[in-house]
Amino acid sequence: THKTMGIVGLGVMGRNLALNMTDHGVTVAVFDPWPDALTRFAVSLNGAAHGRVTVAETPADLVAALPRPRTILIMVKAGEPVDGVIGDLAPLLDPGDTLIDGGNSLFHDTMRREAALRARDLHFIGLGVSGGEEGARHGPSLMAGGDPAAYEASRAVLESIAARFDGAPCCALVGADGAGHFVKMIHNGIEYGIMQVIAEAFALLRDAGGLDHAAMAGIFRRWSQTDLASYLIEITATILARKDDLGDGPLVEAILDTAGQKGTGRWSSEAALDLGVPAPTITEAVYARALAAQKAERVATAAVLGGPAAPAEPAPAWDPDGPEVEAVRQAVLGAVISTFAQGLAVIRAGAQANGWDTDLAAVARIWRAGCVIRAALLDDIAAAVGAADAPGSLLQAPAFARRLEAAQDGWRRTVALAVMTGVPVPGLSSALAYVDGARSERLPANLIQAQRDHFGAHTYERLDRPGTFHTEWER
Ligand code: 6PG
């Protein structure tokens, strides 16, 4: 069991993880090619952890500072920089040493790197780290993928720095090679979906409900006392309450409405498409960010293309405790459950396709604290997917089927209202369509099969007898 770890890359995440480790009695040796990063790290240490930190000036110094078998955590930007660091370190290492990549790497890259290093008798762990800056410093959620023996060797350190839920560390091995990064990718996909549906609720409360930001902050605060209790709902309340230091009014309305993205949401959609598993709300959230980014285009279109006519009499503002607001809450709750169901289904399929023995209940458990999508619902999700007779989809778990039934009335009314008033709600509506599609015993795909057979003789099967059929439709 290592109580020593090397760290390469002292950006915000690497620095905070290093400080977190020193808090937990781990001896760390750090290296960053950028001298300023080393200086900044020394400043943030501020004399603490004296003797338990070695600042190395070269990769070779770093490797020399570590007892064997060595474990080195790489915290650099995903993509080529990771290959660069691996290329620098691997020749300096001995068989049995372990490299851990804690960035948001694409799981295909992690699988490739793991295989290449395994061929050199080196271990490689792809580690999903969630919780942003604060999480890294005081307790992230950690999703590891790799060889169990290598994981075992760093488990004590990883568990010591991880967030805790009811005393249990939010850290687990979720499968071999790319599994940790796959699970983290889907975590981020779910994060995109939940952020999008919350943003849509905000747009409805403001534009259809006529509520001001103080009222909306209060609403989100109250929602965080319900089944929706979660980190993202809480920070939304805080954000809506914040006044603008540089101008008048709420700060959120001074922020340019073009969302950024670094890739994990899009990769989640791509993985879902590759696996043939629907994840429409995650994908709509990616599209929504893409559309938001086209600001000039939107401004130009807004000038020439109108929406529904405004009512002659403007409707009165909603009562923050009234039924319209409760309907929006139900819509968000339904959409969040739908998004979790979609994400878990992609993880299940990804694990199957890649031969990972991913325990979905363990995934839900380590998401209960530390990560961006931590939510009260995850405790029940863990129980539902971990039950002996766990159904294939979260939607079938009795606790969630009942919740969705209870939420559907408000959810449907909210989506209908948005459609009639022209407020775009791709997240809320796609999440509802996913649920409605999933609970449809029959879908109109029979017509699609007939069309395929009509124009391309693609054949079809019948409900009432076995075999493959083709019809000469125009005869
Ligand atoms: C987390 C976050 C973190 C990061 C995302 C943001 O779990 O701590 O998901 O990984 O904030 O990469 O992604 P975008 O920049 O794509 O929104």
Image (cartoon, helix red, strand yellow):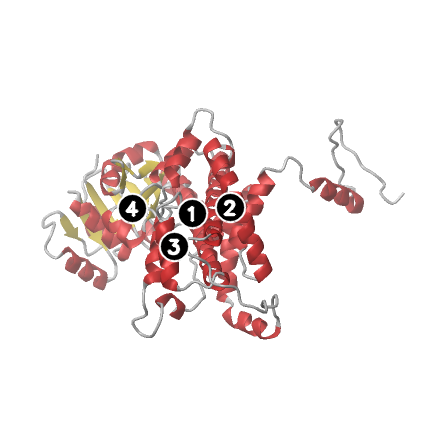
When the figure is inspected, residue 311 is found, relative to residue 366, above or below; the finding is below
Does mark 4 have its CB less than 8 Å from ligand 1?
A: yes
Can you say which quadrant of the picture contains the N terminus?
A: top left
**Which residue matches tag 3?**
219
In the rendered image, residue 96, in percent from the top left (x then y), is placed at 28, 36
Q: Residues within 10 Å of mark 2 (few under 14, many from 20)?
A: many
Q: Position of residue 411 (x, y in %)?
A: 52, 48
The CA span between labels 3 and 1 is 30 Å
Question: In the rendered image, which quarter contains the C terminus?
Answer: top right
At horizontal 23% and vertical 48% (from top left) the residue drawn is 138
Going by the numbered disc 1, the residue's amino acid type is: Met
Residue type at tag 3 = Ile
Front-most of residues 85 and 315: 315
Please report contact status of discs 3 and 1: CB closer than 8 Å, yes or no. Answer: no
User: In the image shown, does 219 or 37 lie closer to the viewer?
Assistant: 219
Q: Earlier in the sequence, mark 3 or mark 4?
A: 4
Whichever of labels 3 and 1 marks the residue nearer the N terminus, that label is 1
Mark 1 surroundings: few (<14), some (14-19) or many (≥20) residues within 10 A: many
Callout 3: 10 Å neighbours few (<14), some, many (20+)?
many
**In the rendered image, the vertical position of residue 170 relative to residue 291, given as above or below:** above
Horizontal side of residue 179 vs 425, given as left or right: left
Query: Counting residues from the N terminus, which is met first, the one under dot 3 or under dot 2?
Result: 3
Residue 251: name its quadrant: bottom left
* Mark identifier at residue 140: 4
Look at the numbered discs 2 and 1 and tell me whether their residues touch, using CB distance below 8 Å: yes
Q: Secondary structure at mark 4?
A: loop
CB within 8 Å, label 2 to label 4:
no
Q: Secondary structure at mark 2?
A: helix
Give the label, 3 or 4, closer to the camera. 3
**Tag on residue 293?**
none
Judge whether residue 195 can be spotted in this image. yes
